[in-house]
Amino acid sequence: MREITYRQALNEALAEELERDKSVFVMGEDVAIYGGAYGVTADLWKRFGDSRVKDTPISEAAIVGMGIGAALTGMRPVVEIMYIDFITLAMEQLNNQAAKIRYMFGGKCVVPLTIRTEGGAGRTLGAHHSQSLEAWLIHIPGIKVVMPATPADAKGLLKSSIRDNNPVVFIEHKMLYNTKGQVPEGEYTVPIGKAQVMRQGTDVTVVAYSRMALYARDAAGRLAEEGIEAEVIDLRTLLPLDIATVAESVKKTGRVVIVEEDTKTGGTGAEIGMQIVEHAFDYLDAPILRIAGADVPMPKSPTLEKLAIPDVERICAGVKEVVG
Amino acid sequence: MQLTKERAHRYLTQMMQIRKFEDKIMELLARNIAEGGSHLYAGMEAVAVGAINAINPDDYITSTHRGHGHAIVKDGDLNALMAEILGKKTGVCKGKGGSLHLADVSKGNLGANGVVGGSIAIATGAALSCKMQGNGRIVVCFFGDGATNQGIFYESMNIAALWKLPVVYLCENNLYGMSVSVERASAVTDLSKKALAFDMPAETVDGMDVCAVADCVSRWAARAREGGGPSFIVAHCYRYYGHSRSDPRVYRSREEERFWKERDPILLFSEKMRQQGMLTEEDISAIDQETTRQIEEATRFAMESPWPEPEELLTDLYA
């Protein structure tokens, strides 16, 4: 199978959906002529023109709000928020409007809006360009939250998100754009709400998503050399959470390590851990361990930034502690 | 806009429907039959009636936290609106929205809003959608004077002007954002000047005069429909009740209230129509009786309607 980058996979998904459905359009800061801050929308403007690939002013609240209005009236907008840090400027529209409109209006309308954004640390960009805010988002009933780790999932899940009749926040990771992976030729989608077992194992379940899923897979490879068989689950979607796949694994292994890049307190791992307790408590042979981001704003210094998020070494150490 | 007898009849009917609907809600609130809050539109009837009658039935509107009047004119189903405000199963939003979220997308009402300024970008996006689809529709975006101090107002107006979107921004300037007057909240008190920042045409209109509002909106709506882009209308009006039922109205004088009530949109219009021979005394009396009957019927319908079933709690979240 051919190998392409995460960035190329996303670009293909957008191009194919723009081609397939006239109601799809792309809108955001620097998405047209420039091709997106991280190059995801490269060449789409040349191919589909101004009317379908639109540069906006720097107005995040209006970008999301206009996406809602267009979605309510027959379009299928894909809007880009350049950094997830800037979604804070659009939280009123996302939380109060996009997520609630269908329910508040008695189910009599749909809001097929995709908000593409990008998060995570790794480029020493400091506190306003490195956050992982997914925990804020999974606290909002009415939206879906998707965080792919591989190029194949990035493409298949973005296509599913665009075709979904609900608001989807699709969070890419800035350190994954250049990663390569096998991506099928031609049409396929990956369902929202389904986790994937990346690696089979019997001793411990490592639950992760986005970049941390790749770290967890690397850690599992190293641990195998030491005789520890870790099962790695890439959640792929955080809302709705595929707790069934996680619980099934935990019932087999009895031990859990959750790896998350977001800050620990009130983080995604807290929710995942509690759902494991609710669904598989009787099968747990050890306390659930969270390996998470430090509870600090992301520091600039590369040495401090590295310390602020999990890495393969910390995951290996955590697994050994739990398997103990 | 040419006023016909049919149109005069409709304007007066709808204004009386709104007034009596709101008076009834106040009564139901006082009797604790309506729970929660309601922001009442009484006094501002000419704006919703004039504006929405100046556009086509398949055009869109977005509404505000003070949205009963817009919904009554755009949706027209008094029973379903009254039931919604009481939280009943038969409500237009199945009892899940309430006073602050009256909406019927199928009839072009993209929704009232609990957040001041919350629907301005939504209206702008709907206008983008109309333009992209080339369906000839336009959007009227209602909001209050308070919303013109929100950031999203500027973001949205800028993009609408930049992209020449078919939207009419209609500011209902009722002089107060809850208790704070325009003078105490906005550095510019002639709110129409705010459109200058976007090179957007603006017009100020007497929001107590339904014909003036209809004329004004129909002109700017026609321009939007022809590709001329957005416009900004400021309608001067007055809400008779306080911001909400708990509001003692200490920030304004009874004299000021009397001044505005002497210019009551229903009285002014009735008198004008009598003088012009568009409506007779008998016509007006018949409209009065019929709208009273309609509101009593809507109230009875709402009060007798069932509550939503418990299963309804978890439905309608995702499509």
Image (cartoon, helix red, strand yellow):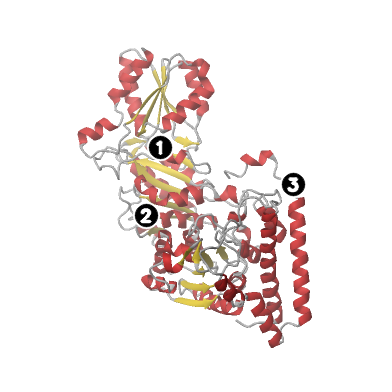
- Residue type, mark 2 in image: Leu
Query: Do we see residue B252 in this rendering?
Result: yes
Residue under mark 3: which chain is it in?
B
Q: Element type at marker 2? A: helix
Disc 1 and disc 2 in contact, CB within 8 angstroms: no
- Kind of residue at disc 3: Pro
Which residue is farthest bottom? B276
Which residue is label 1 attached to? A148
Residue A221 in view:
no
Q: Nearer the viewer, residue A322 or A49?
A: A322
Judge if badges 1 and 2 mark residues of a common chain.
yes
Closest to the observer, B307 or A309: B307
Q: Residues within 10 Å of mark 2 (few under 14, many from 20)?
A: many
Q: Residue at x 67, y 53 (%)?
A: B84
- Front tag of 2 and 3: 3
Residue under pointer 3 = B306
Q: Quadrant of the C terminus of chain B?
A: top right
Quickly name the residue at label 2.
Answer: A44
Viewer-side residue, A14 vs B49: B49
Q: Are marks 2 and 3 on the same chain?
A: no
Q: Position of residue B45 (x, y in %)?
A: 62, 70
Identified at 37% across, 59% down, the residue is A56
Question: Which quadrant would residue B259 be assigned to in this image?
Answer: bottom right
Query: Residue drawn at (59%, 52%), measured in percent from left and top?
Result: A109
Amino acid bearing label 1: Pro
Label 1 to label 3: alpha-carbon separation: 45 Å
Say which quarter of the image contains residue B280. bottom right
